[in-house]
Image (cartoon, helix red, strand yellow):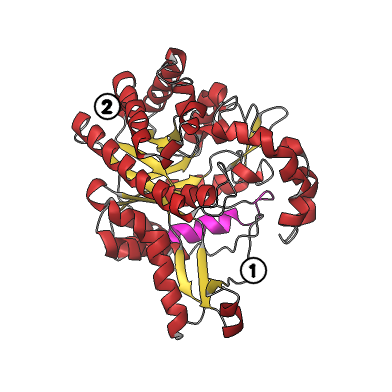
Amino acid sequence: MSKQKHKTASTNLFPKNFMWGASTASHQVEGNTYNQWTVWELQHARELANTANERLSWIPGWERFRDKAEDPENYLSGVGIKHYELYKNDFEIAEKLNLNSFRFGIEWSRIEPEEGVWNVEALRHYEDYINELAVRGIEPVLNLWHWTMPVWFTDKGGFSKRSNIMYFERFVKKLCDELPLEKVRYIITLNEPNVYASFGYATGEWPPNEKKWWKFMRVYYNLTIAHKRCYRLLKKRYPHMQVGVASQLANIQAKRPQNFLDNLAVRWMRYFWNWWFLNRIKRYQDYVGFNYYFTDYYRFGSLREMIKGKFFYRDNPHAPTNDLGWYMEPEGLHALIIRVWAHYKKPMLITENGLADSSDEHRRWWIEETIIAMERALSEGVELRGYFHWSLLDNFEWAYGWWPKFGLVDVDRKTMKRTVRPSAKFYADQIDRNS
């Protein structure tokens, strides 16, 4: 097949209005936020730095990142990358990369810094933000909640109390009243509720650092209620708006495909991690949004391991891995798309997908394999509407801090200079080829 014929065939697979984009989250890029996470950062930065080698020395290439990871300043979001001030400059970069859509978050703690007190200046900022995207012809995809919350809300117990959901509803209603949401076709209510509930209330690694399974299930369930209420609110106000979530889904496979017990472990993990939340909101989502980073292989434990309480566990290949030591299998996206389609028969958005790669060694390969996976899925009849790479910019990576580099664009935090990585130029070329 000639190159020209291949280009034509490939182009026809992606819908004409396919959204090619990138993602960000408010706390991770804006800077100068004050929420429950910034409070946690100040409390735990030194501890995280002191225990970095103990926690992370297993990562391949650890010595390259050790100095930064052992610096307490690494764990403070601080001024961020000043996206709050430099967003127009960042949108210009997005345009040059051929992005026709952009996923962003609105920081609740800016809008309502104190209970019932609304920050008019912040509301006007986000109004200008949405208008600026619209003027540039970039589809705004708005994320209402990406884990961070006002301190006053978490002081009340956050989402662990069902009565507190009304405060989140009130916040969403305020956005409907104040922002030009008629220019927003796609809204994500919640980002990765499974990750937030697990790390905050089951493993206790993130704020509020609780290890209570009953509380984990309460928070997880309350988030389904929060989504449903906001879905009704938004659809009543904007009937044609597309509303969904961004769940974190993994391509979960059996380590030994012919082993009954391994497959039993896989069935449980797929249900618990991938489907539990989505099943409870399936009548309250216009599309299935999901973030893909992982293909995970599970195996059932040996008798000795089961005696120790390890009934099944993740057993991934040792290579290739990204800077965080996460096993990389971008082509696994295809199997996951097909599985999501079989479960829900709804349009899909890949709301996050990317890797930590400071040397930009693997990102081009990752993007290329991801596009091939999407092409395969489209050829099999699924309705895939968009893809958002994580992230447009290097950002604050939560409990890891600043050293992991997920950005298509490198950011020097001393000068705030933005530099487009070679892989980003490759992504821009692929968008041009497939649009």
Question: Taking the image as drawn, is residue 429 in sight?
Answer: no
Counting residues from the start of the chain, the first of labels 2 and 1 encountered is 2
Q: Main secondary structure of the magenta part?
A: helix
Q: Amino acid at mark 1?
A: Ala
On the question of residue 160 being in view, the answer is yes
* Residue 400 horizontal side relative to residue 312, left or right: right
Residue type for callout 2: Glu
Of residues 410 and 343, which is closer to you in this image? 343
Position of residue 198 measured from the top left corner of the image (x, y, whole percent): 49, 53
- In the displayed structure, 146 sits above or below 167; it is below
Q: Pointer 1: residues within 10 angstroms few (<14), some, or many (20+)?
A: few
Q: Position of residue 90 (x, y in %)?
A: 53, 30
Say the numbered circle drawn on residue 319.
1
What residue lies at 40% left-to-right and 66% top-to-bottom?
270
On whether residue 368 falls in the magenta region, the answer is yes
Q: Is residue 174 magenta?
A: no
State left or right for residue 371 relative to residue 304.
left
Q: Is residue 301 above or below residue 207?
A: below
Segment tinted magenta in the rendering = 357-374
**Image position of 82 with respect to 253: above or below:** above
- Residue 79 tag number: none
The numbered mark at residue 182 is 2
Observer-nearest of 102 and 60: 60
**In the rendered view, does 399 fall on the left or right side of 334?**
right
